[in-house]
Image (cartoon, coloured by chain):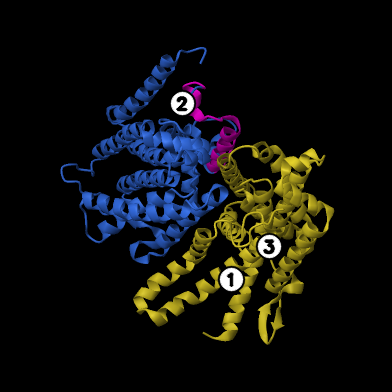
Chain colours: A yellow, B blue
């Protein structure tokens, strides 16, 4: 195993982690604050990617794609929240799972109907198409930019939640919503806002993922499952948990897939390693999550109330 | 309650249940009479999913544990048949014993870990386990991997020739009716009472002195075993085993079937599975001759319409179709 390769894979894992963080930050807030299971979050990400790719296809400008995709996903999220999801806040988790499962099927078909079954592609913006030099190692600048964007979003979220009045209200609603409502705060508005921000972040994730992944119907589901793993591993409702959880999951998954098969070959026979390597690598994050939940059911970084 | 005295409601429920079971019993006779043997396979499929949904209902409806990973057990059942037959073991009893044995061990272990969490975390951890097995199946290159594994023949149960579709149909029918009766006894026995008590107020059940986790774990394992039998039957029906049986959408569909039919009712999952799979069949392949290109729309985008259907049912029906069918007093059964 060569160190430059390991370092590059580590950065790739970091980049996947940052992408997961953009998705899990919004979802964990919805889950923690409204106690709402939103399986359609992955579909919002898919819509964001499609909005971006379609705008890019029409204008050829990455900036225009960003200007259209992020607000469009945010508005779509708000629209869905008002139309469907807000009716389910008071119902059992089961119905929330079901309704959002239905939304996934609908949005996949809408995408298939409008843009077709075949994947559509989007180019990396020209300014970021080369590589950057990180300690003597060339790394694609676009992927590096994703990491920077993710860290900036993380820092901004931290500041908003811990240093502003809106953030204080959000935390208050998370720990005792009826009491906050009794003090005269419009809970509905806070909920809609949190949901909108979550949808907007899903749009950001879709936008940055569109040039490096293929944009196609159903692209939201695999990443949704990863996002859920992140949230539960990190601790439901905790932005900090989502951040560390996303990085852990991203790095473990990438490093595991890249090096586990080779590593097993050193220990076991070739045939055993070839069969078991990929299997264990793809199961790794689920094993991690099951272990975390078995030992600490509340996740690694649970929210501290009070 | 004011409209019907209690025994009348009871009788209506028994009538509906009897009619459904009788309808299942008559399908092969009628479809062969009309020369449409295709329906035997379709209804076999419906009954297999009804069986799995019934299993899930034990934890979901009676135990209030939202398992989002029961497709895992369908997969264990199916892969036991697939792997054993590809190794040259054709005896059906061995298939069944292997599936139930592996299933029992994994369900107990997985159940023990899952029971530690509740609510959202429980949903997610069951999902995680089924994904784990899904990826395990995908990477089993020796047994088909991603492409799945076709079977040469169905399980050999000696005197029962499963290669005859009608015989297989009645075997599935027998499994369904047998499980229905067993669940009827189970739900009305002390075990079922305790389980439903846990659903209403677990803390109180603990305070009375019941070791609730033991009851919940038993319910989880029983429901897993029922899904495993459904998996064994599914592999035999399709003569094909594939990781797609364990996809997370299958777990989602099982939940849809249970809720659609009516949670916590004995017949609900059967009704739900029948409605869901018939709807799928109608939207995906039957041309109704609707005007204005509607047929083409249905044919290509039927999955979206299924989604719309799920959404409407979730928002509008709180008791499921079966609960709606036998009246609002459906909870006490």
Q: Which residue corresponds to mark 3?
A: A240
In the figure, A152 relative to A77: above or below?
below
Element type where label 1 sits in the image: helix
- Label 3: how many residues lie within 10 Å, few (<14), some (14-19) or many (20+)? many
Marks 1 and 2 share the same chain: no
Q: Is residue B317 magenta?
A: yes
Of the numbered discs 3 and 1, the one sitting upstream in the chain is: 3
Q: Nearer the viewer, residue B149 or A304?
A: A304
Q: CA distance from mark 1 to mark 2?
A: 50 Å
Q: Disc 3 versus disc 1: distance between alpha carbons?
A: 17 Å
Q: Quadrant of residue A239?
A: bottom right
Q: Chain of mark 2?
A: B
Question: Residues at badges 3 and 1 in contact (C-beta under 8 Å)?
Answer: no
Start-end of magenta stretch = B301-328
Give the number of the mark in front: 3 or 1.
3
Q: How many marks?
A: 3
Q: For the residue carrying disc 2, how many other residues have a C-alpha within 10 Å: few (<14), some (14-19), or many (20+)?
A: few
The residue positioned 64% from the left and 38% from the top of the image is: A88
Q: Between residue A229 and residue A23, name the one nearer to us.
A: A229
Q: Which mark, by number, is residue A208?
A: none
Q: Chain of mark 3?
A: A
In this figure, which residue is indicated by the disc labeled 1? A251
Q: Which residue is mark 2?
A: B332
Whole-percent x, y for residue A165 in the image = 84, 53
The residue under the point 65% across, 61% down is A242
* B119, above or below A271, in the image: above
Residue that appears at 74% across and 45% down: A191
Q: Main secondary structure of the magenta part?
A: helix
Taking the image as shown, residue B183 lies to the left or right of residue B310, namely left
């Amino acid at each position: 195993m060569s160190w430059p390769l390991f370092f590059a894979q580590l950065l790739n894992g970091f980049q996947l982690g940052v992408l997961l963080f953009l998705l899990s930050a919004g979802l964990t807030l919805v889950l923690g604050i409204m106690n709402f299971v939103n399986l359609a979050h992955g579909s919002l990400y898919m819509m964001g990617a499609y909005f971006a790719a379609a705008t890019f296809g029409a204008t050829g400008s990455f900036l225009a794609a960003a200007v259209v995709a992020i607000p469009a996903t945010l508005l779509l999220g708000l629209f869905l929240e008002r139309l469907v999801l807000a009716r389910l806040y008071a119902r059992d988790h089961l119905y929330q799972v079901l309704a959002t499962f239905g939304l996934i099927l609908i949005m996949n078909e809408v995408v298939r109907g409008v843009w077709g079954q075949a994947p559509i592609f989007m180019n990396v913006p020209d300014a970021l198409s080369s590589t950057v030099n990180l300690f003597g190692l060339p790394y694609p600048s676009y992927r590096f930019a994703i990491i920077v964007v993710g860290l900036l979003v993380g820092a901004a979220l931290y500041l908003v939640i811990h240093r502003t009045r809106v953030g204080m209200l959000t935390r208050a609603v998370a720990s005792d919503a009826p009491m906050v409502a009794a003090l005269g705060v419009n809970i509905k508005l806070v909920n809609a806002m949190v949901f909108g921000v979550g949808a907007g972040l899903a749009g950001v994730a879709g936008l940055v993922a569109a040039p490096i992944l293929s944009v196609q119907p159903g692209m939201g589901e695999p990443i949704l499952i990863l996002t859920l793993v992140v949230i539960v591993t990190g601790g439901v409702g905790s932005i900090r948990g989502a951040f560390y959880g996303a990085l852990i999951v991203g790095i473990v998954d990438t490093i595991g897939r890249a090096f586990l098969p080779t590593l097993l070959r050193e220990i076991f026979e070739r045939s055993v390693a070839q069969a078991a390597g990929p299997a264990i690598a793809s199961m790794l994050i689920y094993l991690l999550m099951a272990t975390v939940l078995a030992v600490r059911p509340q996740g690694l970084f649970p929210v501290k109330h009070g | 309650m004011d409209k019907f005295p209690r025994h009348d409601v009871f009788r209506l429920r028994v009538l509906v249940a009897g009619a459904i079971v009788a309808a299942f019993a008559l399908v092969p006779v009628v479809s062969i009479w009309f020369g449409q043997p295709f329906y035997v396979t379709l209804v076999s499929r419906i009954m297999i999913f009804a069986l799995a949904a019934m299993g899930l209902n034990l934890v979901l409806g009676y135990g209030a544990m939202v398992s989002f990973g029961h497709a895992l057990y369908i997969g264990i059942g199916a892969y036991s048949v697939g792997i054993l037959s590809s190794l040259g073991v054709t005896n059906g009893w061995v298939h069944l014993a292997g599936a139930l044995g592996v299933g029992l061990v994994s369900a107990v272990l997985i159940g023990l870990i899952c029971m530690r969490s509740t609510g959202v975390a429980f949903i997610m951890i069951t999902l995680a386990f089924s994904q784990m097995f899904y990826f395990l199946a995908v990477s089993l290159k020796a047994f088909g991997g991603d492409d799945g594994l076709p079977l040469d023949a169905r399980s050999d149960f000696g005197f029962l020739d499963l290669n005859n579709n009608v015989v297989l149909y009645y075997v599935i029918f027998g499994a369904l009716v047998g499980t229905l009766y067993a669940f009827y006894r189970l739900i009305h026995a002390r075990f079922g009472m305790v389980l439903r008590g846990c659903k209403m107020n677990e803390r109180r059940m603990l305070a009375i002195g019941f070791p609730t986790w033991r009851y919940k774990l038993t319910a989880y394992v029983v429901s897993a075993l029922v899904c495993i039998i459904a998996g064994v039957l599914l592999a035999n029906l399709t003569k094909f085993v594939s990781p797609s049986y364990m996809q997370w959408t299958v777990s989602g569909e099982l939940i849809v079937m249970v809720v659609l039919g009516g949670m916590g009712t004995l017949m609900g999952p059967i009704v739900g599975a029948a409605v869901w799979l018939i709807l799928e069949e109608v939207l995906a392949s039957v041309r109704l001759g609707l005007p204005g290109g509607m047929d083409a729309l249905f044919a290509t985008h039927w999955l979206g319409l299924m989604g719309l259907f799920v959404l409407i049912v979730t928002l509008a029906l709180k008791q499921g179709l079966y609960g709606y069918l036998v009246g609002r007093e459906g909870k006490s059964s």
